[in-house]
Image (tube, grey):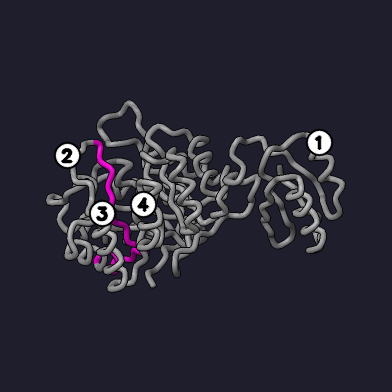
Amino acid sequence: MIIVMRVGSSDKEIAGVVARIESAGLKAHLSQGVERTIIGVVGQIYPELRDRFEMLPGVDEVILVSKPYKLSSREFHPLDTIVKVGGVTIGGKEIVVMAGPCAVETEQQLLETAKAVKAAGATILRGGAFKPSTSPYHFRGLGEPGLELLAQVRREVGLPIITEVMSPVEVELVASYTDVLQVGARNMQNFSLLVEVGKSGKPVMLKRGFSATVEEWLLAAEYILAQGNDQLMLCERGIRTFETYTRNTLDISAIPVIEKVSHLPIIADPSHGTGKWYLVIPMALAAVAAGADGIMVEVHPHPDAALKDGAQSLTFENFQMLMSQLKPVAEAMGRCLASPS
């Protein structure tokens, strides 16, 4: 349910509506625009509530939300959400580039990559300390030593970091090191994990599951938003289809769909979305042209020697090429690339 306040409604009237919502055992979420305030109502809604709330002072209209996801819907929150990561803002005019190795391997590898991607224009450093693998025999990350390396390189290079958390019991540990908590595709519906990352208060990036519909993806986002954490962005990283030539099928159409139905920023991951390094640049350009708020790209000093996902990683030279091509596309969309601080 959405309660739309009249233009010019007073703070007292808004507070009165919020108090009435809470007295009914429901939660109120305020979205205050330049001209009008919208109050989202979350909880067990029954039809009689509509008439009760419409009679309150300052209320213009009460709208029942038809979608099963509430907090992540644009009906509920008409204004775009802006996620702030240090000095980086995600969801506004600037397009953010997150880049770095799939997995943290050594201090030299991470530091060399961080310096290269920052010099080319990346604003956030990505790198996995805990890595999910289909096979138990593949490299699964350095664990906490990898987190320590990420924090060390952040101090030296000055880029905020994003890294994946895989288990509810690891949220506190990972949150103590990173700037953004990433929930991977395999954990999109790990509801216990979603609740814990929501409680952390840290910015979160929620990747789309291999076979998840947009509705399932947004319902997963509800678990995080319901904990009071509005610093959430989504990431389209490819879905599983009948096609076997690419690792996944990057669903470019999901980007404008999300922008239409949700207020959350949307990031594209063309590295996982294709699994092939030579497809990363064209798909990144397509994602920005489709309206993505940022891209996440894997970069490695020596992709042929990478312990994880070398086939989809860009060299430093190819990453520079990507950044040079992204700029005019962003400008054509009326946007610009964010600059590293």
- Residue at the location (84% across, 55% down)? 58
Q: How many marks?
A: 4
Q: Which residue is mark 4?
A: 170
- The C terminus: image quadrant: bottom left
Of callouts 3 and 1, the N-terminal one: 1
| Label 2 to label 3: alpha-carbon separation | 16 Å
Outermost residue toward the top in this view: 242
Image position of 131 with respect to 331: above or below: above
Mark 1 is on which residue type? Glu
Image position of 248 with respect to 322: above or below: above
Give the secondary structure at mark 2.
loop
Give the secondary structure at mark 3.
loop
Viewer-proximal residue among 257 and 213: 213
Q: Is residue 116 left or right of residue 185?
A: left
Q: Is residue 192 visible?
A: yes
Q: Is residue 336 left or right of residue 61?
A: left
Determine crowd level at label 4: few under 14, some 14-19, many 20+ residues with C-alpha closer than 10 A: some
Mark 2 is on which residue type? Tyr
Of callouts 4 and 1, the N-terminal one: 1
Q: Which residues make up the magenta segment?
A: 116-134
Q: Are marks 3 and 1 in contact (CB under 8 Å)?
A: no
| Label 4 to label 1: alpha-carbon separation | 43 Å
Of callouts 3 and 4, the N-terminal one: 3
Give the secondary structure at mark 1.
helix
Q: Is residue 214 left or right of residue 183?
A: right
Determine crowd level at label 3: few under 14, some 14-19, many 20+ residues with C-alpha closer than 10 A: some
Mark 3 is on which residue type? Gly
Of callouts 2 and 3, the N-terminal one: 2
Of callouts 1 and 2, the N-terminal one: 1
The mark found on residue 137 in the picture is 2
Q: Give the x, y percent position of residue 178.
A: 37, 61
The mark found on residue 48 in the picture is 1
